[in-house]
Amino acid sequence: MAKISGNEIRPGYVIEHDGGLWVAVKTNTVKPGKGGAYNQVELKNLINGTKLNERFRSAETVEQIRLDLKDFSFLYEQGDALVFMDTESYEQLELAKDFVGERAAFLQDGMMVTVQLYEERPIGISLPDQVTLTVTEADPVVRGQTAASSYKPAVLENGIRVLVPPFISAGERIIVDTNEITYMRRAD
């Protein structure tokens, strides 16, 4: 672990502050007319998700945390748990569904995910940015609807509802953004 001064904190840095692990979401260097400059940092707690705004002066030091990133393969769902396998050691890891959140619906057999570990404890997970899914239901196109936002609702094979362009019909495969949960394009 490395000590860094308060004005070196950048978005994405993980620091130890007030006994917890925090990730810097936004930073803003402020130089007031009187007094010394400081770094205004918006922090998000990695464990419980609470947010905090904190001022760090250049004389203050904080502990920058290095997270281990490990690749895991999704195996199966078991009740309220999701089971992943370490691709190197073949050890299995169980994570609660609420740990992954609503994006758990995008998990597919064998999908590779990256798990962020701190002292061998999982604190975050990142799925691929895009997945290919089949449309199971799509509303028919309404003729004469020429408004710019003429998207229609559709249901995907995993039960998620997204808005798709009028030319998409049931049975087609589309690519969905897993971060925004939005339609991107038709799959090849």
Image: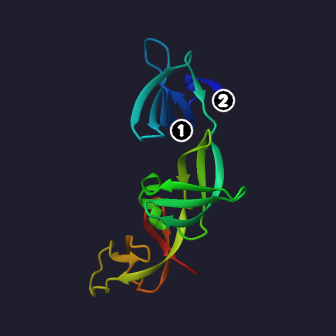
Residue drawn at 59 percent across, 26 percent down:
63
Residue drawn at 49 percent across, 33 percent down:
27
Residue drawn at 39 percent across, 70 percent down:
160
Mark 2: which secondary structure? Answer: loop
Q: Quick check: 147 left or right of 184?
A: left
Give 16 or 165, whichever is nearer the viewer. Answer: 16
Residue 97 shows which numbered tag? none
User: In the rendering, at what x and y percent does residue 89 appear?
Assistant: 72, 55
* Residue furthest out toward the right: 88
Residue 136 in view of the camera = yes
Q: Are marks 2 and 1 in contact (CB under 8 Å)?
A: no
Residue drawn at 43 percent across, 26 percent down:
54
User: Mark 2 vs mark 1: which is more N-terminal?
Assistant: 2
Mark 1 belongs to which amino acid? Pro
Residue at numbered disc 2: 1
Label 1, residues with CA under 10 Å away: few <14, some 14-19, many ≥20: some
Mark 2 belongs to which amino acid? Met
Q: Quadrant of the C terminus?
A: bottom right
Q: Quadrant of residue 118?
A: top right
User: In the rendering, at what x and y percent does residue 110 appear?
Assistant: 61, 69
Residue at numbered disc 1: 11
Question: 40 above or below 158?
Answer: above
Mark 1: which secondary structure? Answer: loop
Cα distance in 3D space between marks 2 and 1:
18 Å
Q: Quadrant of the N terminus?
A: top right
Label 2, residues with CA under 10 Å away: few <14, some 14-19, many ≥20: few
Q: Quick check: 144 left or right of 13?
A: left
Residue 177 in view of the camera = no
Question: 27 above or below 160?
Answer: above
Question: 11 above or below 142?
Answer: above
User: In the rendering, at what x and y percent does residue 28 appear?
Assistant: 48, 31
Q: Which of the two marks, 2 or 1, is nearer to us in this view? A: 2
